[in-house]
Image (tube, rainbow, N blue to C red):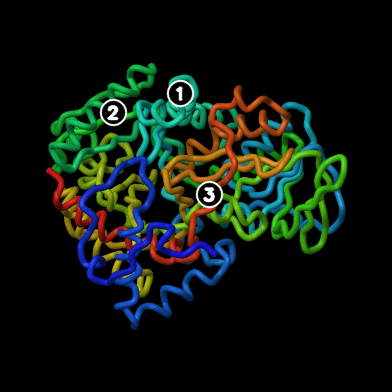
Amino acid sequence: MVPIARLGWNCRPARCRTPPACWKPMACLSSASLTASWCLLRRLPAWRCCWWSDHMTLPWQQPVSDSYWQASDVATSVFPVLQDTVSADVVVIGAGYAGLSTALHLAREGRSVVVLEAGDIGHGGAGRNNGMVIPALTRAFPDDLRRHYGDVRGERMARFVAGSAAFTFDLIRELGIECEAVQQGWIQPAHSPGRARQAVQRARQWQALGASVSELDAAGVQALSGATEYFGGWIAHDGGHVHPLKLVRGLAAAAQAAGAQIYVQSAALKVEAALPGWQVRTAKGAVQAQRVVVTTDAYADGLFPALQHSVVPVQFYQLATSVLPESVRAQVLPGQVAISDTRGDMHFARPTVDGRLVSGGVLAVPAAWRPRLESRIRARLARVFPHLGLDWRFEHGWFGHVGITLDFLPHLHELAPGVVALTGFNGRGVALAVAAGKMLAEAAQGRSSDDLDIPRTQPKAIPLHGVVRKVATLELLRYRWRDRKEV
């Protein structure tokens, strides 16, 4: 067993009282900050049992709660439970955006493909997210990717990211998926003058790749979004928003129509080598396939421990308002854009086609989440959108999980010969996951790693993953502290 001291952890309580002085976009969570989070958690005895028990349920078993997406999509898809042994060229584990896009592209290539979903279609992250379609990563920009992967591979990945939203909307139109798709752009407004200067640099990096991106000054941000507190920003014109549950159900229908076999309530319990390929067992059946694609992201279980321990599932909450008056809608997100700003404790909002706002965030501790989150987001929206007024309320609230990697990058892993996995969308999983399906289909057909848009690597388990998973959201306190200090 590796001593804690050798891992760089410092458990002295005196050091837990001071937030770390700096943060780097490509750096992992610091040992000091995680220790500080742990010490804070220990000082909250009334909430500790709520914190720990909240994470005991497997993610796909957690209720969707009062989801606006569920309430506004009464149509349900009917897929069978796997109750026999079937064979295919490829078996895909996970029926979210990435898994279904992979199955769709494989089926179009004439490959036989089986998709296994532990819950129902849309019960995981694909049916719980905010629905923003964003052609950008959470923290890394083109120059960061070149430094991280080298000029050639880094630029290739940057071009993939830059084109992901356009790919997604083009596929939606091609398939005729009715998912309230609005492609009016995504804005990242800057919450401080320093971040505004950085936004100009970021926009120019994307422009150098040919991306449809523009810089915005404070007046430009306000004109498109109605938000008055920002100092500038940038807009990705290819971005936008969708009804996420309708999108994933539409992808499932399209994949099935193309020839994919989709099974729900059929969690993969065991993956075994079975020449000439692999056998994936479920509770009532099995799939014999030459290749396996794993797309569970934040909803990974112990099927592949190294994969599960390479990503931190962070609980993310969403709230939907009542339908706003027409006079308010003319001034709040009037251009139908989606926004998510530069704060560590990110402020975000998007409109729906029936005139609501959907916003939300992360809580450091999940106890009594609904009233606490409503209070915080109401105050936040009132500050960001002064024209919002008081004639509205929150009508829906729900949560899901976001898969966070320590470098905030998505990772394509080769778990074994013929077994690939994609994980770590870091809150940008609509555009990236749909677009990645084409790449995963190529990987499943044996395409060389050098020809893939995301470099293929081996998963690296996060040391003390169980502890990191418990305290990760307490990093939010440090983000808020940093946001207040930035100039």
Report which residue position mark 2 lands on.
Answer: 202
Judge from the rendering whether residue 352 lies leftward or rightward of residue 257; answer left or right: left
Q: Amino acid at mark 2?
A: Arg
Disc nearer the start of the sequence (1/2): 1
Q: Residues within 10 Å of mark 1 (few under 14, many from 20)?
A: some
Disc nearer the start of the sequence (2/3): 3
Report which residue position mark 1 lands on.
Answer: 159
Q: Residue at x 35, y 26 (%)?
A: 143
Residue 1: name its quadrant.
bottom right
Q: Residues within 10 Å of mark 3 (few under 14, many from 20)?
A: many
Residue 36: name its quadrant.
bottom left
Q: Amino acid at mark 1?
A: Arg
Closer-to-camera residue (235/159)? 159
Closer-to-camera residue (444/360)? 444
Q: Residue at x 46, y 48 (%)?
A: 405
Using the image, determine if residue 136 lies above or below residue 329. Answer: above
Between the C-alphas of marks 3 and 1, the distance is 24 Å
Instruction: Give the mark count.
Output: 3
Look at the image and tell me whether residue 282 can be seen. Answer: yes
Q: Residue at x 54, y 27 (%)?
A: 453
Between the C-alphas of marks 1 and 2, the distance is 14 Å
Between the C-alphas of marks 2 and 3, the distance is 28 Å
Report which residue position mark 3 lands on.
Answer: 126
Residue 469 location in percent, x, y?
45, 62
Disc nearer the start of the sequence (3/1): 3
